Image: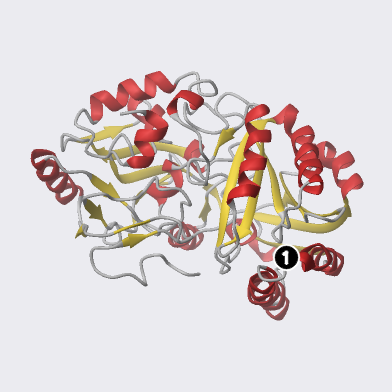
């Protein structure tokens, strides 16, 4: 997968999607919490801002540095394993894929995760990265402890018993409360998932979605715009006997997940940018070519998959009970417009959690994610969909394109003012501020 850090000049930053960039930065690569604290204190004294930005997988400018860019790559790896408590502590610059591989070697696993694994742990939890279904859909809901450097350069440890109010909010902290240095996750014994992938008609998928979500551990759907076709993905827990794994054959995995889903799809959507009139027919053909697939593998290999085609994305969480109606309205609006959308719409669900700025905070949630190719004009499409999401009480994913402001978000996040008060305490000089945070949190 393309990495936003691998193709840039010194002192510059841009995110993976290419939507956000910055230049003229002081770049620092700290190797310890003490070094992070020293950088933060120095910046505070000079009236400058600091932003830790890793692999750049947020589509928004949430991680955009303005003065000092902390590169977290030297702060990676597991630092503690507690098998009695079933927790693992890792440095915050660790990429999720690195953690997954290390946990597998330890015979351990996270409970749930999203569908890519390129993000750093700090970036993933700070933006509310989530999966679908399960007891805890969001990565942050699996966090039981953090250490972070505040805007005054103080290293603070937060657990259920030590600074619990910091842990409560910092699990999805938007990078506004401090620089995360370590994260402690609740883990469990390595387990298998049986994946059942099945194409369906729109009507069948809509009429059976609630039953699928109730019977499977994790459910994901993809609607192909301009068609009546869906791809459904259901994952079922299949025990902890790893010898029972029946993974996708190597050739089939390469064909489906690398060649067709990335190489061919990327080339097709790039061409369709220049031939938008052909998109409906191409989507119908692609949807009809999908076949059923069933396999069993260790959890992280089922949850995550490669994403090499660069795209733009907006995602909202609406109340679970409003989800299917919101999806149906999105289809009606797309079909009534002159838009031509070549990427599927992704549908997921999540149980409520207790994290104040989680998109699933205190309510079961239904996620709708809208995508375009990086070279397509996403603005008109996202604007149409965003209006529907807002009308249904939607909360935007912090790391994905949206236009909401602090005034807008106060209506859907009852505890936003508490978060702002904690920010005042931990970062009184706004050392961690940037344009995005000023928009969604205020000055």
Q: Going by the image, does 322 lie left or right of 186?
A: right
Q: Residue at x 49, y 39 (%)?
A: 142
Res 51 visible: yes
Total labels drawn: 1
Please state which of residues 212 and 2 is positioned toward the viewer in this rendering. 2
- Secondary structure of residue under mark 1: helix
In this rendering, is residue 332 above or below 264?
A: above
Q: Position of residue 318 (x, y in %)?
A: 65, 32
Res 80 visible: no
In this rendering, is residue 90 above or below 45?
A: below
Q: Position of residue 77 (x, y in %)?
A: 34, 58
In this rendering, is residue 410 above or below 325?
A: above
User: In the rendered image, which residue does mark 1 sit on?
Assistant: 276
Residue lying farthest to the bottom in this orientation: 251
Q: Residue at x 51, y 57 (%)?
A: 107
Q: Going by the image, does 315 lie left or right of 194?
A: left
Q: Quadrant of residue 412?
A: top right
Q: Going by the image, does 317 lie left or right of 334?
A: left
Q: Position of residue 133 (x, y in %)?
A: 67, 41
Q: Residue at x 38, y 27 (%)?
A: 160
Q: Going by the image, does 424 lie left or right of 216?
A: left
**Display colour scheme:** secondary structure
> Within 10 angstroms of label 1, few (less than 14), some, or many (20 or more) residues?
some
Q: Quadrant of residue 315?
A: top right
Quarter in which the C terminus is drawn = top left
Q: Position of residue 368 (x, y in %)?
A: 67, 43
Q: Quadrant of residue 209?
A: top right
């Amino acid at each position: 997968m393309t990495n936003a850090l691998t193709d840039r000049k010194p002192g510059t930053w841009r995110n993976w999607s290419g939507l956000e960039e910055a230049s003229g930065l002081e770049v620092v690569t700290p190797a310890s919490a003490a070094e992070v604290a020293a950088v933060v204190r120095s910046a505070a004294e000079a009236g400058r801002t600091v932003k830790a930005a890793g692999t750049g997988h947020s589509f928004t400018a949430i991680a955009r540095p303005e003065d000092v860019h902390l590169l977290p790559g030297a702060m990676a790896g597991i630092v503690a394993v507690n098998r009695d408590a079933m927790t693992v502590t890792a440095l915050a610059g660790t990429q999720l894929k690195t953690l997954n591989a290390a946990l597998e070697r330890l015979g351990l696993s996270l409970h749930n995760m999203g569908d890519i694994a390129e993000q750093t742990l700090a970036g993933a939890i700070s933006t509310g990265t989530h999966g679908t279904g399960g007891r805890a859909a969001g990565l942050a809901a699996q966090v039981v402890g953090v250490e972070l450097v505040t805007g005054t350069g103080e290293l603070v440890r937060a657990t259920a018993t030590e600074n619990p109010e910091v842990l409560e909010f910092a699990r999805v902290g938007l990078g506004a409360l401090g620089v995360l240095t370590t994260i402690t996750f609740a883990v469990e014994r390595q387990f298998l998932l049986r994946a059942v992938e099945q194409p369906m008609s729109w009507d069948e998928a809509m009429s059976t979605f609630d039953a699928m979500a109730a019977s499977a551990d994790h459910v994901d759907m993809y609607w192909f715009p301009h068609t009546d076709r869906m791809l459904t993905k259901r994952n079922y827990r299949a025990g902890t006997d790893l010898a029972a794994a029946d993974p996708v054959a190597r050739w089939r995995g390469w064909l489906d997940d690398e060649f067709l889903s990335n190489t061919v799809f990327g080339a097709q959507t790039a061409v369709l940018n220049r031939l938008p009139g052909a998109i409906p027919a191409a989507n119908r053909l692609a949807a009809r070519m999908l076949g059923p697939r069933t396999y069993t593998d260790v959890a992280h290999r089922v949850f995550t998959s490669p994403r090499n085609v660069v795209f733009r994305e907006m995602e909202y969480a609406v109340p679970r009970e409003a989800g299917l109606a919101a999806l149906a309205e999105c289809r009606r609006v797309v079909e009534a417009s002159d838009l031509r959308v070549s990427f599927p719409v992704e549908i997921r669900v999540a149980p409520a959690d207790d994290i104040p700025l989680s998109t699933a905070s205190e309510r079961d949630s239904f996620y709708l994610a809208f995508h375009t190719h990086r070279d397509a004009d996403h603005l008109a499409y996202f604007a149409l969909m965003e209006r529907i999401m807002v009308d249904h009480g939607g909360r935007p994913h912090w790391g994905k394109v949206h236009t909401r402001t602090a005034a807008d978000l106060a209506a859907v996040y009852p505890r936003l003012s508490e978060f702002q008060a904690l920010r005042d305490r931990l970062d009184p000089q706004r050392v961690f501020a940037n344009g995005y945070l000023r928009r969604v949190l205020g000055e």
